[in-house]
Image (tube, rainbow, N blue to C red):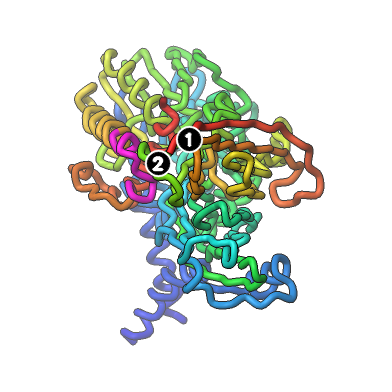
Protein backbone atom coordinates (compact mmCIF):
# COMPACT_ATOMS: atom_id res chain seq x y z
CA UNK A 1 0.00 0.00 0.00
CA UNK A 2 2.88 2.34 0.85
CA UNK A 3 4.18 1.88 -2.67
CA UNK A 4 0.84 2.64 -4.20
CA UNK A 5 0.71 6.01 -2.46
CA UNK A 6 4.31 6.74 -3.32
CA UNK A 7 3.67 5.83 -6.91
CA UNK A 8 0.54 7.94 -7.10
CA UNK A 9 2.42 10.87 -5.61
CA UNK A 10 5.28 10.53 -8.09
CA UNK A 11 2.91 10.26 -11.03
CA UNK A 12 0.70 13.18 -10.10
CA UNK A 13 3.51 15.53 -9.15
CA UNK A 14 5.52 14.68 -12.26
CA UNK A 15 2.52 15.22 -14.44
CA UNK A 16 1.86 18.63 -12.91
CA UNK A 17 5.46 19.78 -13.27
CA UNK A 18 6.22 18.32 -16.67
CA UNK A 19 2.87 19.25 -18.10
CA UNK A 20 2.93 23.00 -17.58
CA UNK A 21 5.47 25.41 -18.91
CA UNK A 22 4.62 28.67 -20.60
CA UNK A 23 6.63 30.66 -23.12
CA UNK A 24 6.32 34.19 -24.46
CA UNK A 25 6.20 33.66 -28.23
CA UNK A 26 5.69 37.33 -29.17
CA UNK A 27 5.45 40.48 -27.07
CA UNK A 28 2.67 39.82 -24.53
CA UNK A 29 1.61 36.50 -26.09
CA UNK A 30 2.15 33.44 -23.92
CA UNK A 31 1.66 29.83 -25.00
CA UNK A 32 1.78 26.53 -23.18
CA UNK A 33 2.59 23.88 -25.78
CA UNK A 34 0.75 20.62 -25.11
CA UNK A 35 2.28 17.20 -25.78
CA UNK A 36 1.26 15.40 -28.97
CA UNK A 37 -0.72 12.63 -27.30
CA UNK A 38 -4.18 11.12 -27.21
CA UNK A 39 -6.19 12.16 -24.16
CA UNK A 40 -5.67 9.53 -21.47
CA UNK A 41 -5.82 8.87 -17.74
CA UNK A 42 -2.26 10.19 -17.27
CA UNK A 43 -2.37 13.47 -19.23
CA UNK A 44 -6.00 14.20 -18.21
CA UNK A 45 -6.57 15.71 -21.66
CA UNK A 46 -4.07 18.53 -21.01
CA UNK A 47 -2.80 18.12 -24.57
CA UNK A 48 -3.75 21.29 -26.46
CA UNK A 49 -1.77 24.49 -26.95
CA UNK A 50 -3.37 27.03 -24.62
CA UNK A 51 -2.35 30.45 -23.35
CA UNK A 52 -3.12 34.15 -23.08
CA UNK A 53 -2.52 37.62 -24.48
CA UNK A 54 -1.73 40.58 -22.22
CA UNK A 55 -2.92 44.14 -22.93
CA UNK A 56 -2.61 47.28 -20.82
CA UNK A 57 -6.10 46.89 -19.34
CA UNK A 58 -7.03 43.27 -19.86
CA UNK A 59 -5.76 39.74 -20.30
CA UNK A 60 -7.55 37.41 -22.74
CA UNK A 61 -7.18 33.68 -22.15
CA UNK A 62 -7.21 31.65 -25.35
CA UNK A 63 -8.42 28.12 -24.63
CA UNK A 64 -8.62 27.18 -21.00
CA UNK A 65 -7.27 23.61 -21.07
CA UNK A 66 -8.50 20.04 -20.95
CA UNK A 67 -9.61 19.87 -17.32
CA UNK A 68 -10.41 22.27 -14.45
CA UNK A 69 -7.01 21.69 -12.77
CA UNK A 70 -5.18 22.75 -15.93
CA UNK A 71 -7.44 25.80 -16.06
CA UNK A 72 -6.45 26.68 -12.48
CA UNK A 73 -2.77 26.19 -13.33
CA UNK A 74 -3.13 28.54 -16.30
CA UNK A 75 -4.92 31.08 -14.13
CA UNK A 76 -2.26 31.06 -11.39
CA UNK A 77 0.49 31.26 -14.03
CA UNK A 78 -1.15 34.36 -15.52
CA UNK A 79 -1.42 35.94 -12.09
CA UNK A 80 2.29 35.30 -11.49
CA UNK A 81 3.29 36.89 -14.80
CA UNK A 82 1.04 39.96 -14.77
CA UNK A 83 -1.12 42.01 -12.43
CA UNK A 84 -3.42 42.93 -15.33
CA UNK A 85 -6.89 41.47 -14.72
CA UNK A 86 -8.27 38.59 -16.79
CA UNK A 87 -11.33 39.95 -18.64
CA UNK A 88 -11.97 37.31 -21.31
CA UNK A 89 -11.80 33.57 -21.88
CA UNK A 90 -11.93 32.81 -25.61
CA UNK A 91 -12.69 29.25 -26.70
CA UNK A 92 -11.46 28.51 -30.22
CA UNK A 93 -13.86 25.53 -30.63
CA UNK A 94 -15.81 22.87 -28.73
CA UNK A 95 -13.23 20.09 -28.32
CA UNK A 96 -12.75 19.07 -24.69
CA UNK A 97 -8.99 19.76 -24.58
CA UNK A 98 -9.80 23.43 -25.28
CA UNK A 99 -12.84 24.11 -23.07
CA UNK A 100 -12.71 22.11 -19.85
CA UNK A 101 -10.53 24.61 -17.99
CA UNK A 102 -13.28 27.25 -18.31
CA UNK A 103 -14.70 26.65 -14.85
CA UNK A 104 -11.42 27.80 -13.25
CA UNK A 105 -12.06 31.35 -14.50
CA UNK A 106 -15.73 31.57 -13.63
CA UNK A 107 -15.24 33.24 -10.24
CA UNK A 108 -13.47 36.29 -11.73
CA UNK A 109 -15.73 39.36 -11.50
CA UNK A 110 -17.18 40.42 -14.87
CA UNK A 111 -15.36 37.67 -16.76
CA UNK A 112 -16.71 37.17 -20.27
CA UNK A 113 -16.56 33.89 -22.17
CA UNK A 114 -16.31 34.31 -25.94
CA UNK A 115 -16.88 31.82 -28.75
CA UNK A 116 -18.22 31.16 -32.23
CA UNK A 117 -21.98 31.67 -32.53
CA UNK A 118 -22.38 27.90 -32.92
CA UNK A 119 -20.21 27.02 -29.92
CA UNK A 120 -23.07 26.90 -27.39
CA UNK A 121 -25.04 24.53 -29.56
CA UNK A 122 -22.02 22.29 -30.02
CA UNK A 123 -21.46 22.29 -26.24
CA UNK A 124 -25.11 21.36 -25.72
CA UNK A 125 -24.92 18.54 -28.25
CA UNK A 126 -21.58 17.08 -27.17
CA UNK A 127 -21.15 18.16 -23.55
CA UNK A 128 -23.12 15.34 -21.98
CA UNK A 129 -21.13 12.78 -23.96
CA UNK A 130 -17.77 14.27 -22.98
CA UNK A 131 -18.83 14.33 -19.33
CA UNK A 132 -20.16 10.78 -19.38
CA UNK A 133 -16.85 9.39 -20.60
CA UNK A 134 -14.51 11.71 -18.69
CA UNK A 135 -13.75 9.31 -15.82
CA UNK A 136 -13.04 6.45 -18.17
CA UNK A 137 -11.04 8.44 -20.71
CA UNK A 138 -9.10 11.03 -18.72
CA UNK A 139 -9.68 10.09 -15.05
CA UNK A 140 -11.26 13.45 -14.28
CA UNK A 141 -14.75 13.71 -12.85
CA UNK A 142 -16.24 16.40 -15.10
CA UNK A 143 -19.79 17.60 -14.43
CA UNK A 144 -22.31 19.86 -16.16
CA UNK A 145 -20.82 22.74 -14.16
CA UNK A 146 -17.63 22.43 -16.17
CA UNK A 147 -19.45 23.34 -19.36
CA UNK A 148 -19.45 27.11 -19.62
CA UNK A 149 -20.94 28.39 -22.85
CA UNK A 150 -19.90 31.74 -24.34
CA UNK A 151 -21.65 34.89 -23.15
CA UNK A 152 -20.33 36.83 -26.16
CA UNK A 153 -20.96 35.17 -29.52
CA UNK A 154 -18.94 35.87 -32.65
CA UNK A 155 -20.99 35.65 -35.83
CA UNK A 156 -18.39 36.86 -38.33
CA UNK A 157 -15.93 39.20 -36.74
CA UNK A 158 -15.31 40.86 -33.37
CA UNK A 159 -12.75 43.41 -32.20
CA UNK A 160 -11.60 43.07 -28.63
CA UNK A 161 -9.68 45.96 -27.08
CA UNK A 162 -7.29 44.75 -24.38
CA UNK A 163 -5.81 48.25 -23.93
CA UNK A 164 -2.94 49.13 -26.27
CA UNK A 165 -3.73 46.15 -28.46
CA UNK A 166 -6.82 45.12 -30.33
CA UNK A 167 -7.54 41.46 -31.00
CA UNK A 168 -9.51 40.55 -34.11
CA UNK A 169 -11.65 37.44 -33.64
CA UNK A 170 -12.96 35.71 -36.72
CA UNK A 171 -15.62 32.99 -36.90
CA UNK A 172 -15.44 30.53 -39.80
CA UNK A 173 -17.93 28.39 -41.70
CA UNK A 174 -17.62 24.66 -40.87
CA UNK A 175 -13.97 23.51 -41.17
CA UNK A 176 -12.12 21.62 -38.40
CA UNK A 177 -15.44 21.79 -36.49
CA UNK A 178 -18.60 23.83 -37.09
CA UNK A 179 -17.47 26.41 -34.50
CA UNK A 180 -13.89 27.42 -35.30
CA UNK A 181 -12.60 30.82 -34.21
CA UNK A 182 -9.19 32.43 -34.79
CA UNK A 183 -7.62 35.31 -32.87
CA UNK A 184 -5.41 37.81 -34.70
CA UNK A 185 -3.12 40.21 -32.84
CA UNK A 186 -2.26 43.10 -35.14
CA UNK A 187 0.44 44.47 -32.86
CA UNK A 188 2.70 41.44 -33.29
CA UNK A 189 1.12 40.12 -36.52
CA UNK A 190 0.33 36.86 -34.75
CA UNK A 191 -2.50 34.52 -35.74
CA UNK A 192 -3.78 32.14 -33.06
CA UNK A 193 -5.14 29.48 -35.41
CA UNK A 194 -5.72 26.76 -32.84
CA UNK A 195 -6.96 23.49 -34.39
CA UNK A 196 -7.32 24.95 -37.86
CA UNK A 197 -3.57 24.24 -37.91
CA UNK A 198 -2.05 20.94 -36.83
CA UNK A 199 1.75 20.63 -36.84
CA UNK A 200 3.18 17.13 -36.35
CA UNK A 201 -0.14 15.86 -34.94
CA UNK A 202 -2.33 14.41 -37.72
CA UNK A 203 -5.08 16.92 -38.57
CA UNK A 204 -8.41 15.74 -37.12
CA UNK A 205 -11.49 16.31 -39.25
CA UNK A 206 -14.67 16.86 -37.26
CA UNK A 207 -16.45 19.38 -39.50
CA UNK A 208 -16.06 19.79 -43.23
CA UNK A 209 -13.11 18.78 -45.39
CA UNK A 210 -14.06 21.19 -48.15
CA UNK A 211 -14.66 23.96 -45.64
CA UNK A 212 -11.27 23.43 -44.02
CA UNK A 213 -9.45 23.52 -47.36
CA UNK A 214 -11.25 26.82 -48.12
CA UNK A 215 -10.04 28.31 -44.84
CA UNK A 216 -6.46 27.24 -45.57
CA UNK A 217 -6.66 28.72 -49.08
CA UNK A 218 -7.86 32.02 -47.62
CA UNK A 219 -5.26 32.24 -44.83
CA UNK A 220 -2.42 31.08 -47.04
CA UNK A 221 -2.63 34.33 -49.02
CA UNK A 222 -1.93 36.40 -45.91
CA UNK A 223 1.36 36.82 -44.12
CA UNK A 224 1.88 36.38 -40.40
CA UNK A 225 5.00 36.59 -38.28
CA UNK A 226 3.83 34.01 -35.77
CA UNK A 227 1.13 31.36 -36.12
CA UNK A 228 -0.01 29.33 -33.12
CA UNK A 229 -1.37 25.87 -33.94
CA UNK A 230 -3.77 23.97 -31.69
CA UNK A 231 -1.30 21.08 -31.50
CA UNK A 232 2.42 21.04 -32.24
CA UNK A 233 5.23 23.62 -32.19
CA UNK A 234 4.72 27.36 -32.72
CA UNK A 235 5.39 28.39 -36.27
CA UNK A 236 7.39 31.32 -37.64
CA UNK A 237 7.47 30.22 -41.26
CA UNK A 238 3.96 30.86 -42.57
CA UNK A 239 2.60 29.70 -45.01
CA UNK A 240 5.18 26.93 -45.35
CA UNK A 241 4.05 25.35 -42.10
CA UNK A 242 0.50 24.73 -43.29
CA UNK A 243 1.58 22.84 -46.41
CA UNK A 244 1.75 19.40 -44.76
CA UNK A 245 -1.79 19.81 -43.42
CA UNK A 246 -3.02 21.12 -46.76
CA UNK A 247 -1.49 18.23 -48.69
CA UNK A 248 -2.93 15.67 -46.31
CA UNK A 249 -6.44 17.12 -46.54
CA UNK A 250 -6.21 17.50 -50.33
CA UNK A 251 -5.05 13.93 -50.73
CA UNK A 252 -7.88 12.79 -48.44
CA UNK A 253 -10.42 14.60 -50.62
CA UNK A 254 -9.01 13.30 -53.93
CA UNK A 255 -8.72 9.75 -52.68
CA UNK A 256 -12.15 9.53 -51.05
CA UNK A 257 -13.86 11.15 -54.07
CA UNK A 258 -12.25 8.57 -56.37
CA UNK A 259 -13.39 5.71 -54.17
CA UNK A 260 -16.97 6.99 -53.99
CA UNK A 261 -16.94 7.22 -57.78
CA UNK A 262 -15.71 3.61 -58.01
CA UNK A 263 -18.79 2.60 -56.01
CA UNK A 264 -16.86 1.59 -52.89
CA UNK A 265 -18.56 1.54 -49.49
CA UNK A 266 -17.30 3.15 -46.30
CA UNK A 267 -16.24 -0.17 -44.74
CA UNK A 268 -14.12 -1.02 -47.81
CA UNK A 269 -12.41 2.36 -47.74
CA UNK A 270 -11.59 1.92 -44.04
CA UNK A 271 -9.81 -1.34 -44.86
CA UNK A 272 -7.75 0.01 -47.77
CA UNK A 273 -4.00 0.53 -47.48
CA UNK A 274 -3.42 3.93 -45.86
CA UNK A 275 0.34 4.19 -46.28
CA UNK A 276 0.21 6.91 -48.98
CA UNK A 277 -1.22 9.29 -46.38
CA UNK A 278 1.12 8.58 -43.51
CA UNK A 279 4.16 10.81 -44.17
CA UNK A 280 5.62 12.07 -40.87
CA UNK A 281 2.35 12.44 -38.98
CA UNK A 282 2.08 11.49 -35.34
CA UNK A 283 -1.11 9.82 -34.06
CA UNK A 284 -1.81 8.68 -37.62
CA UNK A 285 -3.28 5.32 -36.61
CA UNK A 286 -5.46 7.00 -33.99
CA UNK A 287 -7.15 9.52 -36.29
CA UNK A 288 -6.74 8.69 -39.97
CA UNK A 289 -9.68 6.29 -40.16
CA UNK A 290 -11.89 8.77 -38.37
CA UNK A 291 -10.90 11.35 -40.99
CA UNK A 292 -11.68 8.90 -43.79
CA UNK A 293 -15.14 8.27 -42.29
CA UNK A 294 -15.94 11.97 -41.95
CA UNK A 295 -14.66 12.76 -45.44
CA UNK A 296 -16.62 9.89 -46.96
CA UNK A 297 -19.89 10.93 -45.31
CA UNK A 298 -19.38 14.51 -46.47
CA UNK A 299 -18.26 13.86 -50.05
CA UNK A 300 -20.92 11.28 -50.93
CA UNK A 301 -23.38 14.20 -50.96
CA UNK A 302 -21.36 16.26 -53.45
CA UNK A 303 -23.26 15.44 -56.64
CA UNK B 1 8.68 -6.06 -3.63
CA UNK B 2 9.22 -5.67 -7.35
CA UNK B 3 6.10 -7.66 -7.98
CA UNK B 4 4.05 -5.48 -5.68
CA UNK B 5 5.29 -2.38 -7.44
CA UNK B 6 4.39 -3.86 -10.77
CA UNK B 7 0.97 -4.78 -9.46
CA UNK B 8 0.45 -1.20 -8.31
CA UNK B 9 1.33 0.09 -11.76
CA UNK B 10 -1.06 -2.34 -13.33
CA UNK B 11 -3.80 -1.29 -10.93
CA UNK B 12 -3.28 2.43 -11.39
CA UNK B 13 -3.18 2.40 -15.17
CA UNK B 14 -5.36 -0.48 -16.18
CA UNK B 15 -8.15 -0.58 -13.68
CA UNK B 16 -10.16 2.35 -15.02
CA UNK B 17 -9.76 1.16 -18.60
CA UNK B 18 -10.68 -2.41 -17.69
CA UNK B 19 -13.76 -1.44 -15.79
CA UNK B 20 -15.21 0.32 -18.80
CA UNK B 21 -13.95 -1.98 -21.50
CA UNK B 22 -15.40 -5.08 -19.85
CA UNK B 23 -17.37 -7.25 -22.21
CA UNK B 24 -20.23 -7.61 -19.78
CA UNK B 25 -23.70 -8.55 -20.93
CA UNK B 26 -25.55 -7.62 -17.75
CA UNK B 27 -27.66 -4.96 -19.38
CA UNK B 28 -28.73 -7.34 -22.11
CA UNK B 29 -29.45 -10.23 -19.76
CA UNK B 30 -31.22 -8.21 -17.10
CA UNK B 31 -33.10 -5.56 -19.08
CA UNK B 32 -32.90 -5.53 -22.85
CA UNK B 33 -33.64 -9.17 -23.62
CA UNK B 34 -36.81 -8.94 -21.56
CA UNK B 35 -37.72 -5.62 -23.15
CA UNK B 36 -37.50 -6.83 -26.74
CA UNK B 37 -38.01 -10.60 -26.56
CA UNK B 38 -39.99 -11.43 -23.43
CA UNK B 39 -40.81 -15.13 -23.34
CA UNK B 40 -38.92 -15.85 -26.57
CA UNK B 41 -36.08 -18.27 -27.03
CA UNK B 42 -33.08 -16.82 -28.84
CA UNK B 43 -31.18 -19.48 -30.76
CA UNK B 44 -27.54 -19.29 -31.83
CA UNK B 45 -27.70 -17.49 -35.15
CA UNK B 46 -24.38 -18.07 -36.96
CA UNK B 47 -25.93 -20.36 -39.58
CA UNK B 48 -28.71 -17.87 -40.34
CA UNK B 49 -27.04 -14.42 -40.37
CA UNK B 50 -23.59 -12.90 -39.99
CA UNK B 51 -22.95 -9.52 -38.41
CA UNK B 52 -19.93 -7.52 -39.61
CA UNK B 53 -18.66 -4.58 -37.58
CA UNK B 54 -15.27 -2.93 -37.25
CA UNK B 55 -13.28 -3.96 -34.15
CA UNK B 56 -13.05 -0.31 -33.10
CA UNK B 57 -15.48 2.54 -33.68
CA UNK B 58 -12.94 4.80 -35.44
CA UNK B 59 -15.54 7.52 -35.73
CA UNK B 60 -18.24 6.86 -33.13
CA UNK B 61 -20.70 8.89 -35.22
CA UNK B 62 -20.16 6.69 -38.29
CA UNK B 63 -19.69 2.99 -37.59
CA UNK B 64 -20.43 0.83 -40.64
CA UNK B 65 -22.27 -2.41 -39.78
CA UNK B 66 -23.70 -5.10 -42.03
CA UNK B 67 -26.00 -8.09 -41.57
CA UNK B 68 -25.63 -10.81 -44.22
CA UNK B 69 -28.17 -13.60 -44.59
CA UNK B 70 -26.88 -17.12 -45.28
CA UNK B 71 -29.63 -17.94 -47.78
CA UNK B 72 -31.91 -16.31 -50.34
CA UNK B 73 -35.49 -15.45 -49.41
CA UNK B 74 -38.13 -17.92 -50.67
CA UNK B 75 -41.85 -18.03 -49.99
CA UNK B 76 -41.28 -21.17 -47.91
CA UNK B 77 -38.30 -19.95 -45.89
CA UNK B 78 -37.44 -16.33 -45.34
CA UNK B 79 -36.22 -13.88 -42.74
CA UNK B 80 -39.17 -11.77 -41.72
CA UNK B 81 -37.48 -9.29 -39.45
CA UNK B 82 -34.06 -8.25 -38.18
CA UNK B 83 -33.72 -6.25 -34.98
CA UNK B 84 -30.51 -4.40 -34.14
CA UNK B 85 -29.49 -3.38 -30.61
CA UNK B 86 -26.41 -1.61 -29.21
CA UNK B 87 -26.42 -2.58 -25.53
CA UNK B 88 -24.66 0.43 -24.02
CA UNK B 89 -26.07 3.24 -26.15
CA UNK B 90 -28.34 5.66 -24.22
CA UNK B 91 -31.15 4.43 -26.47
CA UNK B 92 -30.12 0.84 -27.33
CA UNK B 93 -32.76 0.21 -30.03
CA UNK B 94 -31.18 0.82 -33.45
CA UNK B 95 -33.93 -0.37 -35.74
CA UNK B 96 -36.26 -3.11 -36.83
CA UNK B 97 -36.08 -4.13 -40.49
CA UNK B 98 -38.85 -6.16 -42.11
CA UNK B 99 -38.27 -8.19 -45.24
CA UNK B 100 -40.49 -10.21 -47.58
CA UNK B 101 -39.79 -13.00 -50.09
CA UNK B 102 -39.68 -10.17 -52.66
CA UNK B 103 -36.61 -8.73 -50.89
CA UNK B 104 -34.60 -11.57 -52.49
CA UNK B 105 -32.02 -11.56 -49.68
CA UNK B 106 -32.41 -10.23 -46.14
CA UNK B 107 -29.12 -8.33 -46.06
CA UNK B 108 -29.01 -4.89 -44.51
CA UNK B 109 -26.09 -2.50 -44.10
CA UNK B 110 -26.00 0.92 -42.43
CA UNK B 111 -23.92 3.28 -40.27
CA UNK B 112 -24.62 3.66 -36.58
CA UNK B 113 -23.51 5.68 -33.57
CA UNK B 114 -21.62 3.74 -30.90
CA UNK B 115 -21.31 5.67 -27.65
CA UNK B 116 -18.97 3.41 -25.72
CA UNK B 117 -17.54 -0.12 -25.53
CA UNK B 118 -20.52 -2.29 -26.33
CA UNK B 119 -21.96 -5.39 -27.88
CA UNK B 120 -23.97 -4.89 -31.04
CA UNK B 121 -26.62 -7.56 -31.61
CA UNK B 122 -28.65 -8.67 -34.60
CA UNK B 123 -31.68 -10.87 -34.02
CA UNK B 124 -33.39 -12.47 -37.02
CA UNK B 125 -36.97 -13.69 -36.85
CA UNK B 126 -37.89 -16.38 -39.37
CA UNK B 127 -41.25 -16.60 -41.15
CA UNK B 128 -41.80 -19.73 -39.07
CA UNK B 129 -41.35 -17.79 -35.82
CA UNK B 130 -37.89 -18.82 -34.55
CA UNK B 131 -35.45 -16.17 -33.38
CA UNK B 132 -31.71 -16.30 -34.05
CA UNK B 133 -29.15 -13.98 -32.47
CA UNK B 134 -25.59 -13.00 -33.39
CA UNK B 135 -23.41 -10.37 -31.67
CA UNK B 136 -20.12 -8.48 -32.05
CA UNK B 137 -18.18 -6.42 -29.53
CA UNK B 138 -17.08 -2.96 -30.64
CA UNK B 139 -14.41 -0.90 -28.88
CA UNK B 140 -14.96 2.82 -28.49
CA UNK B 141 -12.50 5.36 -29.82
CA UNK B 142 -10.64 7.99 -27.84
CA UNK B 143 -9.87 11.60 -28.56
CA UNK B 144 -12.28 14.40 -29.22
CA UNK B 145 -14.71 12.20 -31.13
CA UNK B 146 -18.36 12.23 -30.21
CA UNK B 147 -21.24 10.26 -31.71
CA UNK B 148 -22.58 13.47 -33.22
CA UNK B 149 -22.77 14.33 -36.90
CA UNK B 150 -20.00 16.70 -37.96
CA UNK B 151 -22.04 19.21 -39.92
CA UNK B 152 -25.57 19.59 -38.57
CA UNK B 153 -26.42 22.63 -40.69
CA UNK B 154 -25.36 20.95 -43.93
CA UNK B 155 -27.59 17.98 -43.11
CA UNK B 156 -30.48 20.32 -42.17
CA UNK B 157 -30.08 22.27 -45.42
CA UNK B 158 -30.44 19.05 -47.42
CA UNK B 159 -33.06 17.46 -45.14
CA UNK B 160 -35.31 15.11 -47.06
CA UNK B 161 -33.05 14.76 -50.07
CA UNK B 162 -32.64 11.11 -51.09
CA UNK B 163 -30.51 9.26 -53.62
CA UNK B 164 -30.63 5.70 -54.87
CA UNK B 165 -27.39 4.12 -56.04
CA UNK B 166 -27.46 0.89 -58.01
CA UNK B 167 -25.07 -1.07 -60.14
CA UNK B 168 -25.22 -0.03 -63.79
CA UNK B 169 -25.97 -3.55 -65.00
CA UNK B 170 -29.17 -4.89 -63.49
CA UNK B 171 -29.88 -8.55 -64.13
CA UNK B 172 -33.44 -9.66 -64.60
CA UNK B 173 -34.75 -11.82 -61.76
CA UNK B 174 -31.58 -11.86 -59.65
CA UNK B 175 -31.41 -10.39 -56.13
CA UNK B 176 -29.83 -6.98 -56.68
CA UNK B 177 -28.31 -4.60 -54.17
CA UNK B 178 -29.64 -1.06 -53.86
CA UNK B 179 -28.12 1.73 -51.80
CA UNK B 180 -30.37 4.43 -50.37
CA UNK B 181 -28.84 7.68 -49.10
CA UNK B 182 -31.04 9.94 -47.02
CA UNK B 183 -30.06 13.42 -45.89
CA UNK B 184 -31.28 13.93 -42.34
CA UNK B 185 -29.40 15.09 -39.20
CA UNK B 186 -31.00 12.22 -37.23
CA UNK B 187 -29.92 13.87 -34.01
CA UNK B 188 -30.01 12.61 -30.48
CA UNK B 189 -31.20 15.88 -29.00
CA UNK B 190 -29.39 18.63 -27.16
CA UNK B 191 -28.63 17.31 -23.74
CA UNK B 192 -27.62 20.35 -21.72
CA UNK B 193 -30.36 21.88 -19.65
CA UNK B 194 -28.84 25.01 -18.17
CA UNK B 195 -28.19 26.45 -21.57
CA UNK B 196 -31.86 27.21 -21.87
CA UNK B 197 -31.62 28.10 -25.52
CA UNK B 198 -31.47 24.42 -26.33
CA UNK B 199 -34.38 22.08 -25.92
CA UNK B 200 -33.93 18.43 -25.18
CA UNK B 201 -35.36 17.25 -28.47
CA UNK B 202 -34.38 14.30 -30.58
CA UNK B 203 -35.15 14.60 -34.30
CA UNK B 204 -34.89 11.38 -36.26
CA UNK B 205 -36.26 9.13 -38.97
CA UNK B 206 -38.97 6.92 -37.54
CA UNK B 207 -40.07 4.87 -40.48
CA UNK B 208 -38.71 3.91 -43.88
CA UNK B 209 -40.61 2.01 -46.56
CA UNK B 210 -39.05 0.78 -49.76
CA UNK B 211 -41.20 -0.83 -52.45
CA UNK B 212 -40.61 -2.17 -55.96
CA UNK B 213 -43.69 -1.78 -58.14
CA UNK B 214 -45.74 -1.29 -54.96
CA UNK B 215 -44.52 -4.55 -53.39
CA UNK B 216 -42.76 -4.04 -50.03
CA UNK B 217 -39.03 -4.77 -50.13
CA UNK B 218 -37.93 -3.26 -46.84
CA UNK B 219 -39.97 -1.67 -44.05
CA UNK B 220 -38.02 -0.25 -41.15
CA UNK B 221 -38.57 1.42 -37.81
CA UNK B 222 -35.46 3.35 -36.89
CA UNK B 223 -34.14 5.62 -34.14
CA UNK B 224 -31.28 7.93 -33.13
CA UNK B 225 -28.56 5.27 -33.20
CA UNK B 226 -28.62 5.55 -36.99
CA UNK B 227 -25.91 8.02 -38.08
CA UNK B 228 -26.64 11.45 -39.52
CA UNK B 229 -27.39 11.22 -43.24
CA UNK B 230 -28.52 7.59 -43.03
CA UNK B 231 -27.19 5.21 -45.63
CA UNK B 232 -28.83 1.79 -46.16
CA UNK B 233 -28.01 -1.10 -48.46
CA UNK B 234 -30.51 -3.87 -49.10
CA UNK B 235 -31.70 -6.24 -51.83
CA UNK B 236 -34.66 -6.47 -54.17
CA UNK B 237 -35.49 -8.61 -57.20
CA UNK B 238 -35.96 -6.71 -60.49
CA UNK B 239 -38.25 -9.16 -62.23
CA UNK B 240 -39.55 -6.55 -64.65
CA UNK B 241 -39.13 -2.87 -65.48
CA UNK B 242 -40.59 -0.65 -62.82
CA UNK B 243 -40.17 1.74 -60.02
CA UNK B 244 -38.14 1.49 -56.85
CA UNK B 245 -39.69 3.84 -54.32
CA UNK B 246 -38.49 4.98 -50.90
CA UNK B 247 -40.55 6.90 -48.40
CA UNK B 248 -39.52 8.03 -44.94
CA UNK B 249 -41.23 9.79 -42.06
CA UNK B 250 -39.43 11.62 -39.28
CA UNK B 251 -40.46 12.65 -35.77
CA UNK B 252 -39.17 14.71 -32.89
CA UNK B 253 -39.31 13.70 -29.24
CA UNK B 254 -38.90 15.70 -26.03
CA UNK B 255 -36.24 13.45 -24.60
CA UNK B 256 -33.20 11.82 -26.17
CA UNK B 257 -33.97 8.54 -24.41
CA UNK B 258 -37.74 8.36 -23.94
CA UNK B 259 -40.31 8.04 -26.69
CA UNK B 260 -43.32 9.04 -24.54
CA UNK B 261 -43.72 12.58 -25.82
CA UNK B 262 -43.17 12.84 -29.56
CA UNK B 263 -44.53 14.91 -32.39
CA UNK B 264 -45.27 13.56 -35.85
CA UNK B 265 -42.91 14.83 -38.51
CA UNK B 266 -42.93 14.99 -42.29
CA UNK B 267 -42.77 12.41 -45.05
CA UNK B 268 -40.44 12.43 -48.03
CA UNK B 269 -40.43 10.28 -51.19
CA UNK B 270 -37.91 9.35 -53.84
CA UNK B 271 -38.26 7.05 -56.85
CA UNK B 272 -35.81 5.34 -59.19
CA UNK B 273 -36.58 3.82 -62.60
CA UNK B 274 -35.46 0.21 -63.02
CA UNK B 275 -34.87 -1.23 -66.47
CA UNK B 276 -33.42 -4.75 -66.25
- Where is residue B110 drawn, in percent x and y? 50, 49
Q: Which residues are magenta?
A: A258-269
- Where is residue A129 drawn, in percent x and y? 58, 49
Residue position marked by numbered label 1 in the rendering: B274
Q: Residues within 10 Å of mark 2 (few under 14, many from 20)?
A: some
- Magenta span: predominant SS is helix
Locate residue A176: give its quadrant. top left
Depth order, front residue of A171/A268: A268
- Where is residue B32 drawn, in percent x and y? 68, 67
Residue at left 50%, top 36%?
B241
Is residue A115 in view? no
Point out the tag, 2 or 1, that comes first from the N-terminus: 2
Residue at left 39%, top 46%?
A266
Residue A137 position (above or below residue A88): below
Give how far apart the Cα atoms at labels 2 and 1 are: 8 Å
Q: Dot 2: what SS?
A: loop
**Is there a contact, CB below 8 Å, between mark 2 and mark 1?**
yes
Residue at left 74%, top 42%?
B253
Q: Are marks 2 and 1 on the same chain?
A: yes
Q: Dot 1: what SS?
A: strand
Locate residue B82: give its quadrant. bottom right
Residue position marked by numbered label 2 in the rendering: B170
Of all chains, the one bearing label 2 is B
Amino acid sequence: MRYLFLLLFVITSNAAIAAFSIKQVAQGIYVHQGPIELPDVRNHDAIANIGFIVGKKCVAVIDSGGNPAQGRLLKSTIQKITATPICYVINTHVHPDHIFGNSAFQDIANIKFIGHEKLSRAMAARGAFYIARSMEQIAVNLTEKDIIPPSILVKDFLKLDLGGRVLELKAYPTAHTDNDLTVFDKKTNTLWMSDLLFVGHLPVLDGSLKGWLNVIAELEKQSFDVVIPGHGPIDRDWPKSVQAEKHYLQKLATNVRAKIKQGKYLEDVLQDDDSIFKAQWQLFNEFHKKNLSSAFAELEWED
Amino acid sequence: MKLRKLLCLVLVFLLPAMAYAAKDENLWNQVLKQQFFAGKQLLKGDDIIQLSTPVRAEDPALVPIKVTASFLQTKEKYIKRILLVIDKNPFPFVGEFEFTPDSGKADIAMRVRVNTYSYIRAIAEMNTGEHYMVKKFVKASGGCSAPIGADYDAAMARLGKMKFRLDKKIQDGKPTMAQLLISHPNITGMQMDQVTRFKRRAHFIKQIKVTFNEKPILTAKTDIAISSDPNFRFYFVPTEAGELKAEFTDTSCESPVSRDVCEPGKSYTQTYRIIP
